[in-house]
Amino acid sequence: MGIWDDICSKTDSIKRNAPDRSRAAVLKIHDKLQPHLPDEETRFKIAADLLINSARFAFFEGVKIVPGGSIVYNIVSQSQSHSVSGKKISKEHTEELKELKDKVKKLEKELSDSKKSVEKLKDKVKKLEKELRDSKK
């Protein structure tokens, strides 16, 4: 029996006789971190984003391997960047869009009111023209 066998047997003996504190340590760490972990909906969103980004990356890297794939990669990546920038713009200008819709509604109401008043004026003009014709007779 060599020195290494003696060291290994002592190490094994210590491992067998030592109390297992790893589970207790994990539970203690978990209890400390629990208040700081995101809720289930947030975890789902993170997982979904991770899955989408991983699939997109795998697709683009796989396309590069195929002969002529770099051309396809360039076309698809350019179209992806345009669609992503369009989404960012629409998110940034949501409030401005709402304000413009409110202004359009207000202007439409003013326009309908103006049309009503124009119709009333036309009716008055017709009445006055009729009175004028009747007075000439």
Image (tube, rainbow, N blue to C red):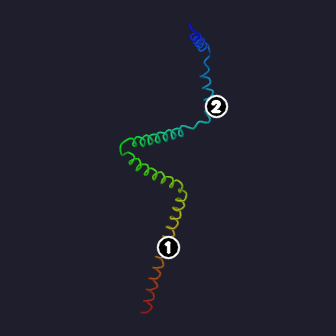
Label 2 element class: helix
Q: Quadrant of residue 57?
A: top left
Place of residue 76 in the rendered image (x, y in percent of width and height, measured from the top left): 41, 49
Name the residue at 50% across, 73% down: 114
Q: Amino acid at mark 1?
A: Ser
Task: Tell me which amino acid carries mark 2.
Answer: Lys
Where residue 120 appears, as percent x and y from the top left, is 48, 77
Which comes sooner in the sequence, label 1 or label 2? Answer: 2
Q: Position of residue 13 (x, y in %)?
A: 59, 11
In the picture of the structure, the residue carrying the numbered disc 1 is: 114
Query: What residue is drawn where x is 62% and y is 33%?
Result: 33
Question: Looking at this rendering, what residue extends furthest in the front direction?
Answer: 2
Residue closest to the eye, 115 or 23: 23
Label 1: element kind: helix
Please, is residue 31 above or below residue 132 in the view?
above
Residue at the spot 61% in from the left edge and 26% down from the top edge: 27
Q: Is residue 21 above or below residue 93?
A: above
Q: Position of residue 39 (x, y in %)?
A: 56, 38
In this figure, which residue is indicated by the disc labeled 2? Answer: 32
